[in-house]
Image: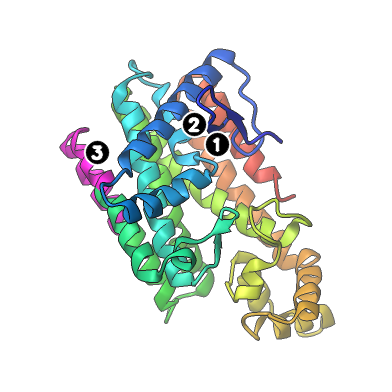
Amino acid sequence: MVDSVVTSGGRPIPRMLLGIDFEDAELERVVETLLVGVEDGLRHAVESVDPLLDDVAHHLVAAGGKRIRPLLVGLAAQFGTRPVCDEVTRAGVVVELTHLATLYHDDVMDEAPVRRGAPSANLRWSNSIAILAGDHLFARAADLAVDLGLDAVRLQARTFSRLVYGQIAETSGPRDRDPIEHHLDVIAEKTGSLIGTSAKFGAMFSNATPEAVDALAEYGEVIGIAFQLSDDLLDIASESAQSGKTPGTDLREGVATLPVLYALADDATDDAGVARLRELLSKGPLTDDAELAEALELLRESTAMKRARETVRGYAERARALLDPLPDIPARRALAALADLIADRTS
């Protein structure tokens, strides 16, 4: 699987999203050009006259990433009459800056020591500095959105509000709600919302039809949920760091992802394996290596894991169906291929 290529400027940019190769060479060229422009825009946007803020703000930009949000901007833009324009590139920078800002804040809340293979900003500097760096990136994203017009500012602000709501809901817990329903809603707010906005921005600023804008926005949100759920499954299913982190990280930190919630809801008391799995998962963080390995083994073979895979597939198939009204162009086939891959990557 190839995740990036090195540009003439020596900067890595994503070439294939999660291993998907573009079947159309021209589409690949257009998207690569957009991503190069986004990388340049990100580096320029986070520059600061203060050397410390400059270092901290560049920290996660330099660490790279899949850049799924600007890529969705670029693919959605192909459905309009202006698929290549400065506004589309700027929109890619806005959504990625917003995403990066949330990572600084997430790492503080999670007390995460590592992000994208490098020490997290909160570990390297401090929680206060990391929070301020995140605020700086949010401010820069809002500043860039102004140049895109009032509708862009309003959408970016509403998306930011959803991100905050999702984080509050995750922190406060389900309270009187069903934990599984609550978990899926949190993912829709924390991940789906910004990916949906990414696709909507691309369609908006390429002058796509209102019908295409709405369909792509909904596709983005649904595929965003599927993408996050599949990443969570990979943390259990993969034998290597395919998910971008050491397998079992969520269990070790006590993070209840969808397979865990399904397992905890399984009341098959006559199944010793199910009972033992529930016993282990009920402990919260599994810091003991032997218990972690046992829980991973039980989860991988559980009906809870099978059910979680079916849930991912359901979201991916729903996203694919949302593309049906759109013109049959290479970008639509790339978006459909993404849905297929997300459905299959944890099988």
User: Do we see residue 211 in this rendering?
Assistant: no
| Magenta part of the chain | 140-161
Q: Position of residue 293 (x, y in %)?
A: 79, 73
Q: Position of residue 81 (x, y in %)?
A: 33, 15
Q: Around disc 1, counting alpha carbons within 10 Å, would you say few (fewer than 14), some (14 to 19), or many (20 or more)? A: many
Single out the residue that lies furthest toward the right.
272
What's the residue type where badge 3 is placed? Answer: Leu
Q: Majority secondary structure of the magenta segment?
A: helix
Residue under numbered circle 3: 144
What's the residue type where badge 2 is placed? Answer: Leu
Is 185 rendered above or below residue 340?
below
**Cβ–Cβ under 8 Å for marks 3 and 2:** no
Q: CA distance from mark 1 to mark 2?
A: 6 Å
Q: Quick one: label 3 or label 2, which is nearer the N terminus? A: 3
3 or 1: mark nearer the eye: 3
Q: How many marks?
A: 3
Q: Nearer the viewer, residue 319 or 287?
A: 287
